[in-house]
Image: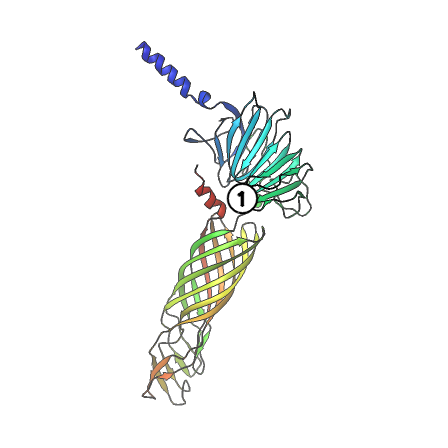
Amino acid sequence: MRRLVVALAILAFFTSPSRAAPNIGSATAIEKDVRGESDGRTAKIGVGDAVYADEVLSTGAESRGRFVFEDRTDLQLAPSSRVKLDKFVYSNDKTAVFSATKGALRFISAPAGHKDYEIRTPNATIGVRGTSFAVRVRLGRTDAVLYDGVIEVCPIGGGACRTLDTPCTFVTVASGGATAPAALGSGDWSFDDSCKVPGRRAGETPPLAPMTPPPATPASTASPIDWSGPSFGFDAGTGVGGGEFADPVPMNGAAFLGGLRFGYSFALTKEIIAGFETDASYRSDLGGGSNGHAQASSARGGYFGTARIRLGYAFDRLLVYGTGGLAYGHIIAPRSFSGYNVIAAPYTYGTNRENPFLPGWTVGAGAQFAITDNVSVRAEYLYAKLQHYLPLYDTNTSPLPYATCTVSALHSIRVGVNYGFSLKDLLSIATPR
């Protein structure tokens, strides 16, 4: 029994977190969901909780965290970020290594400046000694902004290293190497507004309070939405006829429209969003019309779809856009008609023999609002006109089918729900946690 107790004590000593991974600091400010992953276990982190060497720190989509290490190094994480505390040594080589795989961080080295620091990203290494700077990993590139001191940024794939020694300058590392140092401009990324650049909007996230949890971020200062990447959703609404039949009789009735949509967007800048999308909807019977001396019945139901490009401007969570491209669908022609002077002077009635599928074009505009980073709602107007066609009608005035002029056009107003996942979401799925 005595031997068993001793064995269990030894086992507990060698497997305890303090033995396997030394405590190197603690969380001083936490907003919402911040987690630490160590030894295959993941747990939420609160203010005052310890962090350990080799631990992976991650923040949720609307979460932030601030950590102060034993040498007083300060690390702040923006939403949707992931950093591993690879190495933290106080003796011998006196080195600290942090690996950032996604998101953004702000780093303030120890006041004494006695340690060599290194930040690693998927395509760059950043050498640090006694300084303050920020890093963002996004869409296969690394952005580094210097606030104070000196850093050296080196592409992992080869190429010249860049030294930043002037406050409020930055470099970007991408597949082609590192850009030359440049002054931070109004359209360039920065972690916060430490650099007072005229015309620049607030950056990735404001700084956290030093020792207490910050209040929830109001919607007006929320992190900008990343509109780029694939998306899918569904729409429902109404279609109102804008076409004509025969002499002409207006086809201006209404129909239900509902279906699925898929798209892909590209962020040309932070505000200008381009992309393409395609949708396919079911259209119910569309009501007919009258011109006072003739009647046209409803048109058969069918399908209506588009394949369009769109170009918009994002006001953070609100995206307004114009769109246009190809349309396709079943003809909007009445099942039957009756009246004088429709296809001839005498009273004539006829019944439709065909319901062809036609190509056409469409143009419109819409607005989309992001409820979360992935879910958005939208409202959209489209005008579509299909190819001019002459469907055949059996009539009481001719033994042969009569080809009748028909213009198929549609005004549609639809609302929908959209789910989008940006490239950074895809990269985070591909990166093992």
Q: Residue at x 34, y 88 (%)?
A: 398
Looking at the image, residue 59 lies above or below residue 200: above
Q: Residue at x 63, y 46 (%)?
A: 188
Q: Is residue 85 visible?
A: yes
In the orientation shown, which residue stands out farthest toward the top? 2
Amino acid type of the residue tagged 1 in the rendering: Arg
Looking at the image, residue 181 lies above or below residue 357: above
Dividing the picture into quadrants, the one containing residue 8 is top left
Residue occupied by mark 1: 138
**Total marks in image:** 1
Q: Residue at x 49, y 65 (%)?
A: 325
Q: Nearer the viewer, residue 64 or 215?
A: 64
The picture places residue 304, in percent across and down from the top left corner, at 41, 66
Q: Residue at x 41, y 72 (%)?
A: 358
Q: Is residue 47 visible?
A: no
Q: Looking at the figure, which quarter contains the N terminus?
A: top left
Circle 1: element type: strand
The picture places residue 286, in percent across and down from the top left corner, at 39, 70
